Image (tube, rainbow, N blue to C red):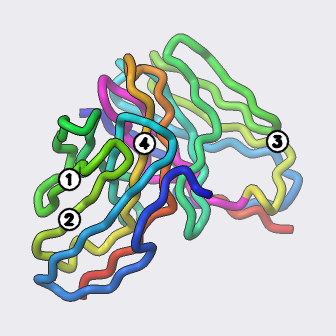
Amino acid sequence: DADVTQTPRNRITKTGKRIMLECSQTKGHDRMYWYRQDPGLGLRLIYYSFDVKDINKGEISDGYSVSRQAQAKFSLSLESAIPNQTALYFCATSESGTGKDNVQFFGPGTRLTVL
Amino acid sequence: KQEVTQIPAALSVPEGENLVLNCSFTDSAIYNLQWFRQDPGKGLTSLLLIQSSQREQTSGRLNASLDKSSGRSTLYIAASQPGDSATYLCAVKGAQKLVFGQGTRLTINP
């Protein structure tokens, strides 16, 4: 089984709908991240969480919210989806600690299309 | 603000060639630099991680170098194979987060 799973893998929705993307991990990592990837651009950080009670905004948090339900689960919500949120979304995890050496492990991605 | 650039955006070479992918970054105050591979429909796989105090790392046919003072890293792939076809991303680690380049899409032609 994959260490980092994302559901759904693909989603098509309409403008104005509320969407939740879910991420689960079995690696036992404290830190979890949400990124989006757009064609021709690198991954950009949306939100990150260093433990269950810690939530931080990333580079592009506007229009998104997150929930860290447990150490193993980190959900990303689009309260009212808009077409420019069409992108590939990745969840990632890493160990806690100094943060200097931590490799991030990525899920397979969720392709979201907002019509 | 850290910016990471990868050139070229796409590269197509015949099988068996040695090749170099480039990554540059604007702020040399980094903890480490990672090279990832991304396959369509799959997540990112970490290939190599170079600490800021290191000059290079090797794994099989892959060799990554880091020149922090000039803000550059290269990924060298020896004896390329069709299975190496993928998008390669570099990312630099600052105080708390990774900053990614836009990637180089590599195609190895049989």
Q: Is residue B100 magenta?
A: yes
Horizontal and vertical percent for residue A44? 31, 51
Instruction: Name the residue at 88% across, 53% down.
Output: B16
Secondary structure state at the residue bearing disc 2: strand
Q: CA distance from mark 1 to mark 4?
A: 15 Å
Q: What residue would you read off at disc 2? A: A77
Q: Which residues are magenta?
A: B85-105
Horizontal and vertical percent for residue A110? 41, 69
Please tell me whether mark 1 or mark 2 is closer to you in this view. Answer: 1
Q: CA distance from mark 4 to mark 2?
A: 18 Å
A94 w.r.t. A16: above or below? above
Q: What residue would you read off at disc 3? A: B78
**Whether label 1 touches label 4, CB < 8 Å:** no
Q: Within 10 Å of the Cα at label 2, are there few (<14), some (14-19), or many (20+) other Cα atoms?
A: some
Q: Chain of mark 3?
A: B
B77 w.r.t. B73: above or below? below
Q: Are marks 4 and 2 on the same chain?
A: yes
